[in-house]
Image (cartoon, rainbow, N blue to C red):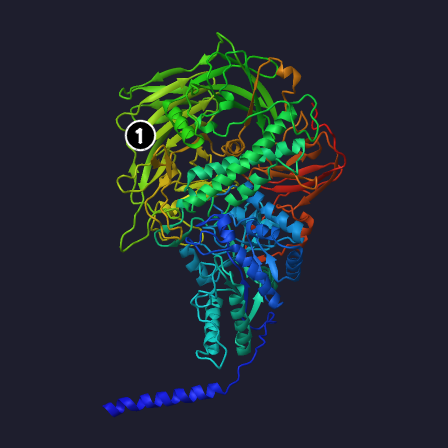
Amino acid sequence: MSKVSTTPSMAVVAMAAFVLVSASIVESKFTVYNTTAKIVADKLNVHLVAHTHDDAGWLKTVDQYYVGSNNSIQGACVQNILDSLIPALLVDKNRKFIYVEQAFFERWWREQSETMQSIVKGLVKSGQLEFINGGMVMHDEAATHYIDMIDQTTLGHQFLKKEFGVTPRIGWQIDPFGHSSVQAYLLGAEVGFDSLFFARIDYQDREKRMAEKSLEVVWQGSKSLGKTAQIFTGAFWQGNYEPPDGFHFEVNDDSPIVQDDPTLFDYNVQDRVNAFVAAAISQANVTRTNHIMWTMGTDFKYQYAHTWFRQMDKLIHYVNLDGRINALYSTASMYTDAKFATQESWPTKTDDFFPYADRINAYWTGYFTSRPALKRYVRDMSGYYVAARQLEYFIGRSQAGPNTDALANALAIAQHHDAVTGTEKQHVAYDYAKRLSIGYQEAEGVVASSIGCLTQSSPVTGCQNPTTKFQQCPLMNISYCPASETDLSQGKHLIVVVYNPLGWKREDIIRIPIKNEDVVVRDSEGRELESQLLPISDVQLSTSNFHVASYLGVTVRDAPKYWLAFAASVPPLGFSTYTVSGVKGAKLTRSSVYTSQGSKKINFDIGSENLKLTFSEENGKLTYHNKQRNLGKNSVEVTYAYYPGYNGTEKDTQASGAYVFRPNGTYVMQSEGKVQSTVMRGPLIDEVHQQISSWIYQITRVHKNKEHVEVEYVVGPIPVEDGIGKEVVTKLSTGMQSDKTFYTDSNGRDFIKRIRDYRSDWELQVNQPVAGNYYPINLGMYLHDDINEFSILVDRSVGGSSILDGQLELMLHRRLLKDDGRGVDEALNETFCAQDKCTGLTVQGKFYFRIDRLGEGAKWRRSFGQQIYSPLLLAFSEQDEDNWLNSHLPTFTGIDSSYSLPENVAMITLQELDGGEVLLRLAHLFEIGEDKDLSSMANVELKRLFPSKKIGKVTETSLSANQEREEMEKKRLVWKSQASSAQTSKVTRGRAIDQAELILELGPMEIRTLLIEFSNKSDRIFDA
């Protein structure tokens, strides 16, 4: 036995010695790698696309990621990436790289010398460095509003146009957690992109598409714009944006490198080539045509770029020597052009890619609601930014400041797919909020000075120091407004300027907190207006006092006791002025207040003939009754519940967290005894206040001359002492037979039909009947039966669904105790610490609902949706004299005083650019067939939008204003698709602008972007 066992060992040793001696006589020398490969028509072409994915905040803040600090959390430094990248590209002119996030690149660019900037411009010009997507961030597609998506993309595109003269042509949304139809047609085709690539689609959808070779499609995201706004779209086959396994080449990655030095051990060229070919063939088997893309990079890679390029140089060289397939340095645009050149006819995709699950029981639908307070702050600042830019334009933009740039940048970064989504660490969420606050403070100065200038008797362009100083109240939502709480008993007067950023005249109820009871409200003509006092509830007061003391360090000793409500009528893109004065014995209507004990089986009404609500204390239901529109009586039950968050088990670890919504049953909130109702009635507003539970408070509100219901809620602190996280929802139940069908908006734009437990692209295997039917809501949702429609509109991004027929539900707040295992490594447990104690975060918000006849609800959803997004802006000034109105201009409109925009058109951008041009965007609000009257062509008279200026030239551009529309259309790749006749039907778009008539046409869902140059600049801003 011993002989048998020792003889092979001797043989092995002898063979090893022979190999070693043989190797020692092979001379090592410098190798020139051939990286010049181009496309080969009769081979499989592997496009190596080198990239890095740089989150603008996630585990670290955006600044920490840039400079490379706080590395105990994550070793990532974008500055190193860009510093390392440029020298690596200069080594070989065939090397290529794509870069996406301009929030980082712009920072780095500012720090570079003229010499380095010149080198980089050369790399961009040669095509070695290509900018794709090109926005400030890679924005989310679920929790973002389409106006924010446009603005942040435009900001990045303007930077690239100014510095490099380039217009990105590829969409690269590789990390967002599901993909919207608005991204495809609006932020894709309408910005001039020829293709769109991403990684994350539902695992069931991916399996089917791989089998059918339909991961790459032509996506028609808009039924209104159809094939005129379609885009070639590719989903990466592995479900991520990394290279195939075994081909990661960061310094500390464990993939085998190509060891091609024969003088050293572990020579593995053929092994590496074989592995490369095998991986390529696997991908080719699920991909059409002879072109595949390898995404060579992932999060924060290329911190030492040479390690990646050295290995790719070798792979290209040796794979092409092998000859079975062809490997080449490429970019996303080169890959797109190669796909187009094959003239393949592609499958067609409609609707969207929501919701997204990466595995069984793991639906990424929780982030639709995560961090609802941050989501509301982002939405507030978005609407404010629209108004601030308008006012900035009216008085003339100041380069030196203050201006709206800081708010623009903060909002742009907040659209990142780990920002507004609520999927970042807590300290990063604070950073986003801080940036918004800083941006708001500067924009607040712009608004105050603009209104001050516009109210002067002789306003002139460039007014910087108005005589009247105006204040605003960003904390009005918690009834804190020092500017309106002035003591009016000593003959002082409160001037209230109400600005309307919409293009239509607007009539609404204004509510401001005041201390004095004896006041009167007068309009700009001195007419006394009907007004109403409503007591501020104890819940509202305690919330206000606690947060003001905690955040501002202010102890409120004489808090306002009342809301003062009065009706305002405000012209389009203009303001009206109102005066609140102290008058002893004023005939101000105080709300009648009635408090039920919650024990009697009684009904009570609020509202008027326009809309009457009848509350039943016995069962908590309310009856919605509108006589004028002959709707009859409809029962609506508003209830609250929570889903206990699944904490995971040893066998099934998937928990509910910041990303993933995984409920563990449902718990309907039961009132602690009968719900006590406090009813307030008055000539303008009726309210019902109800303490639903110890941590849920609700106000149901009806306004005079309005036909919708406003529900204000206060949720929190969510109790977790039982060790169970909770996901709080409100359910609105009707008797409508909706047949599993409901409709949700896409980024505040198009509405998409949803059917419970159904997907149009594959046969859904239902494993999460609640989470798998949740969708992102930015504007609202609705359902209908054969007679009526029931609609809900929201004030921020939330998740929503229809789990039962006739019922809509919204998720309002989430507090969870486990991490869901998707990288953030932190439970979504938002707390508020102040006065030596920490509690769960309390969230306040509103939603609105209304019932219409079938086919008539769109008008309310679209028009009132604009009012929610762009609320009236209030500015206050305290005056000692009563003649302020006589010495100032109390009313203003920025457009022709006899003109307003058509009711199906919104002005979403009015902005003066640095060069003096004006950027104007107008959006048609209705889809094709959505409304019998308003889903039609609309005309806008540009001359009447700028009555005091002579328009010299109007240029229509792409959505992001970085190229002329006509040139964009000429360059657009027209893809062949397997579209049905319905998908190729005629589309209604507005005609080119006549430079003489200056009439702009807009078809359904069309957004038109214009750059306007004026031939003269009048000192006078408007016609008084």
Q: Does 992 sit left or right of 792 as displayed?
A: right
User: Residue 28 at x, y = what percent?
Assistant: 53, 81
- Packing grade of label 1 (10 A; few <14, some 14-19, many >=20) is some
> Is residue 886 in view from this perspective?
yes
Q: Where the N terminus falls, by quadrant?
A: bottom left
> Is residue 755 in view from this perspective?
no
User: Residue 665 at x, y = what percent?
Assistant: 29, 43
User: Residue 459 at x, y = what percent?
Assistant: 69, 25
Q: Which residue occupies the foreground of this view, 399 or 150?
A: 399
Which SS class for mark 1? Answer: strand
**Residue drawn at (42%, 67%), measured in percent from left and top?**
254
Q: Does 327 sit left or right of 756 as displayed?
A: right
Q: Residue furthest left?
A: 1
**Residue drawn at (68%, 44%), measured in percent from left and top?**
956
Name the kind of residue labelled 1 in the image. Answer: Ser
Q: Where the C terminus falls, by quadrant?
A: top right
Q: Residue furthest top?
A: 585
152 over 835 or under it: above or below: below
